[in-house]
Image (cartoon, grey):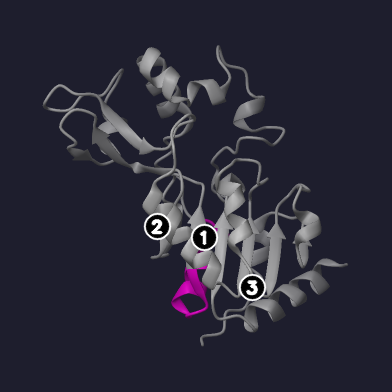
Amino acid sequence: MYIFDVIEKLQTMIDASKRIVFFGGAGVSTESGLPDFRSADGLYSQKYKYPPEIMLSRTFFDRHTKEFFDFYRDKLLLPDAKPNAAHHKLAELEAAGRLIAVITQNIDGLHQAAGSRNVLELHGSIHRNICMNCRKSYGISAMLESSGIPHCTCGGIIKPDVVLYEEGLDSEVLRQSIEMLSRADMLIIGGTSLVVYPAAGLINEFNGNHLVLINRDPGQFDERADLVIHRPIGEVLEQIVVQVI
């Protein structure tokens, strides 16, 4: 199927839908210059003293706290990143009354920066940080302006409000995600290989009309989709014309 025909089919599905949910992963933000995890040039393919999945675990955070923060600042804190075409088009779909939620595995806050309002962050956000002792909240500047292990005024360690390996997802975010997926008449999955659970398992809550997968590389769920597009998601979504309901 030529790309023109694929875009036309996607456009038809979007035009026929009024309760779209977008489920996205790291590939959504690569066009903004952020690294993904599992592609050939992703974080998992780079060489560190420890594998990234170890360095981003709760055990590593507790046992090697300074090394955790060195890696976190170097690879996950990219404050100059800007929303790309995918982020902006999703915000436009929401403003037009067609998209009811963005469910994201990303922690970069770029969906909100583009104007999306109903964003469910499965893995938390770099923009929220909480003292492990007194629970005082801090913004991203607490990480950017600190070195070594960041400490609260009370002396406690300031931990990013992100879900590390070995930690569970927020139950309220999960509940809202399931509710949005169960209400959706169209689900667009973009920029994710759908291998991280339990997040990937959420797509089983969708029982709507159109399931679309947009990702650079083939994935295990391609056969289940009504439409599969193996191209960068920003390149695809920027061609969609949004009609207000």
Q: Is residue 230 visible?
A: no
Q: CA distance from mark 2 to mark 3?
A: 29 Å
**Quarter of the image holding residue 7?**
bottom right
* Image: magenta residue range: 84-100
Q: For mark 2, does the 10 Å Cα neighbourhood hold few (<14), some (14 to 19), or many (20 or more) residues?
A: some
Q: Position of residue 85 (x, y in %)?
A: 56, 61
Helix, strand or loop at disc 3? Answer: loop
Q: Position of residue 151 (x, y in %)?
A: 21, 24
Q: Main secondary structure of the magenta part?
A: helix
Helix, strand or loop at disc 2? Answer: helix
Horizontally, residue 189 falls left or right of residue 90, namely: right
Q: CA distance from mark 2 to mark 1?
A: 8 Å
Residue to which mark 3 is pinned: 208
Q: Are marks 2 and 1 in contact (CB under 8 Å)?
A: yes
In the image, residue 111 above or below residue 32: below
Q: Position of residue 14 (x, y in %)?
A: 64, 77
Residue depicted at x 47% and y 29%: 166
> How many callouts does the rendering have?
3
Residue depicted at x 51% and y 88%: 245
Q: For mark 3, does the 10 Å Cα neighbourhood hold few (<14), some (14 to 19), or many (20 or more) residues?
A: some
Q: Is residue 19 visible?
A: yes
Q: Position of residue 190 (x, y in %)?
A: 63, 56
Horizontally, residue 144 falls left or right of residue 30, namely: left
Residue to which mark 1 is pinned: 87
Residue to which mark 2 is pinned: 113
First in sequence: mark 2 vs mark 3: 2
Q: Amino acid at mark 3?
A: Gly
Give whichever of 79, 91 is nearer the camera: 91
Q: Amino acid at mark 1?
A: His
Foreground label between 3 and 1:
3
Residue extending furthest left? 154
Residue extending furthest bottom? 245
